[in-house]
Amino acid sequence: MNTGSGKLPPLCAKYGRELNGRSGGVDQILEDFSALDRIAVALSSEEQNNVALTGAAGCGKTATVRKLAATIEAGRYRRLAGRRVVELNIDLINQDRKKRDLRFKHILDEAEYHKIIIYVDEAHRLSENDGPSNLMNTLKPYITSGGISMLISTTSEEFRRYIARDRAMERRFQSIELKEPGPKRLIEILKHVARARYPQTVFTEEAIAETVRLSAVCAPERAEPARSLELLHYAVSAAQIDMRPDEHAAEITKDAVRAAAALKTGEERAE
Amino acid sequence: MVDIEQFKAEMLCGRDTLLLGSSERKKATIAAVIDEWPASCPETALIVFDHGGELYERFAGDALLIDLSSEGSFIPDVAEPFVSNEDIGVSSENIAYAIRQAIYQEIRSRDANDKFFDDLGKLVTDRMLTYMLETAKNVVHNLAAASSEEGGAGVSRTLDRINLFSIFCRQHRYVETLMTKIIGGESDILPVKYRIAEEENSGRPLTRDLALAKYILTRELRFQKNGDRDAPVPFADLLMTNGDNTNTQRCIKMQADASTSDFRALIAMITDNAALFSGNRTLKLESYLREPAGRPLFISGSGNAAADRGLAPLLTAAAGAAARNAKSSAVVLIPEIDRWGVFNYLDKFRQNWERLSFTFGYDNFFRLSLESRTDEERLIDTLYSSSVQRIWHASEEERICKAFETYVSEADVTYAPEDLDSEIRAIEREGHVSYASLQEPAERPRVRKRVRLRRSSGGTTLWITAGAKRSGKLTLESLLEEGETL
């Protein structure tokens, strides 16, 4: 039984991507070990070894899973040592309608055999086709038998609609809600990302605070920290638009954030 | 979860196997098979048709090379296995027929006219080969006599020490000349009967002319259909004309020539380069197959595509005969069957040579389609039916994926070619697939390099010396000099 190193099995490699060992962007995520620990303990459980991460869009579910993979790789959880997290591309699996179910079954066989943790973002897409041919029906025996460990991210509403209505499935899933970070935490996250992503640019304290304040105006439908991060990146991009690609903004101030927010919402750019 | 076993070279033994999929993956499989062979299957000969020579040059173990363009290469005696076989070797006609099976490229007859010329082309070829064999036999007897080797045992001992195929090739030009003369109506091409008796009584070794004449007079009277039974000539029933209307006979000869063009290119290469080959050792196939000792036999392209296509099927058939003689088995590995002109003979070889198994792939699908004269749409079917086992490698090629879907039972499939990766192969027999994993060997540097044969002034015949008669006692060495066999 292969539990770790080496190549991914063929179908997992073709229809998914391994999240372990991928550093792109993960360093920007500030560790929140409380969330990661809860997920890891759940995945290690004998009975409820599947996790549904719920929360508003943009609250950081996908980023948390990526951070979890990196943390497992770093060896923090001995119980999960050697386990790989593979994010499945459901769109790719759905492309071949004829072979979809069989293909998905074989992917799950591989995951079971190689003890791979499967991650599916926007898990409602597993139930896109009602009736016997939806992927959830293929998945169910693997979940209910405890054969695989699965992570899904979904909204609370979708979890209730697609997972919780089936008692056998619900029993096997632990629902972990990711809440939006509070203001203090949000500021920490923004500062962490700013340092990690834009090391040559100084962000003033006022700029960070203004970002948090104005993000609610720019994207009220989205959750934190996604909407603040979006405005942060936008502000940097707006400040650098007239610079060469190898140049960087020296500083992002409160005014720069305001100008970026105005631009983003369609007001005229300040001269 | 599908059970994935370890890929082993011995999976190829005894099974005609087709390799399908990406070139890179197939090459890795082939390299792994060759590397593993000496340890896994030392008692089974592995004969590798290695067109570019890279497989040979990168193989780190002990190996034999046949390469008509390189120094140090063996020159195979591809005539001797037929001659030594107790069923085939009973007569020159039998041997000629066996050889013809491996050199005659059949045409698909579209009408009675095609069939007429094809049938006669075959007869002419059989006859040509028979005459070449009979005169070669005479040469061998002369060699045995010159070495004071007595009787049948002496001839057999002499046969062990010479390259019969080289001698056989050298008879071609003379026999070819006879064919041209008889078409042209020159019926007096042989000495009259009473002179044969004189020459025999003189005790001197028979010349080529007289050996042929004797053969025809004693053996071929039954073929005379053109009147004078006392004036037999070679090919009389097939090619003789009075010199006026020669069209039909010329067409028959052209058919025979065209259908054996690659063989003729091989003969030309052997005879024209005889001086260059004088330093090369002869490979006796039966000895090799009896005890391969884990050494693969590589056959590399000589640079002469026609000669390569002439050699490959003949060598394969000879290996089949040799394997039968030695009661041993061999795997013939042909990664690029489209480069060797073997594909059209494959079914025949599979039927005739039960001790050979073939593992083959192709390099260029279009070229193979041309060579086999099969539409591309039907070619995969044809390839499939020429094998009992398929090894499918990773491939996104539509043709391959579609073929897999057609031939493989869906119930068995976990990985189709588009799902396979660089490690896993799908092994399929009768529609049922299993999977095997292969750790692809790392790219190896060359451990040896072939050295091209070069003409030296000692190998060429200077104009001033050409035609000078040899004097002195005939010896084995003198009889083996370039161009002189009698």
Image (cartoon, coloured by chain):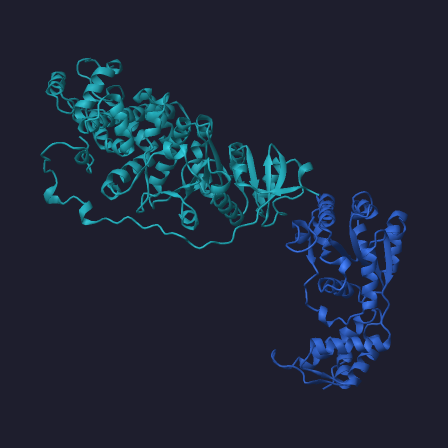
Q: Quadrant of the C terminus of chain A?
A: bottom right
Is residue B63 or residue B167 the one in the foreground? B63
Left or right for B403, reference B276? right
Left or right for B125, reference A82? left
Left or right for B283, reference B295? left
Rendered position, B332 above or below A218: above
Q: Position of residue B291 (x, y in %)?
A: 41, 34
Q: Colour of chain B?
A: cyan
Could you tell me if residue B186 is visible in this image?
A: no
Q: How many marks?
A: 0
Left or right for B138, reference B51? left
Q: Residue placed at 34% from the left, 45% from the top?
A: B302
Q: Position of residue B351 (x, y in %)?
A: 46, 26
Res A27 → quadrant: bottom right
Is residue B17 or residue B117 the one in the foreground? B17
Rendered position, B299 above or below A159: above
Q: Residue placed at 42% from the left, 53% from the top?
A: B446
Q: Position of residue B172 (x, y in %)?
A: 25, 31
Q: Position of residue A29 (x, y in %)?
A: 75, 70
Could you tell me if residue B188 is visible in this image?
A: yes
Q: Colour of chain A?
A: blue
Res B180 → quadrant: top left
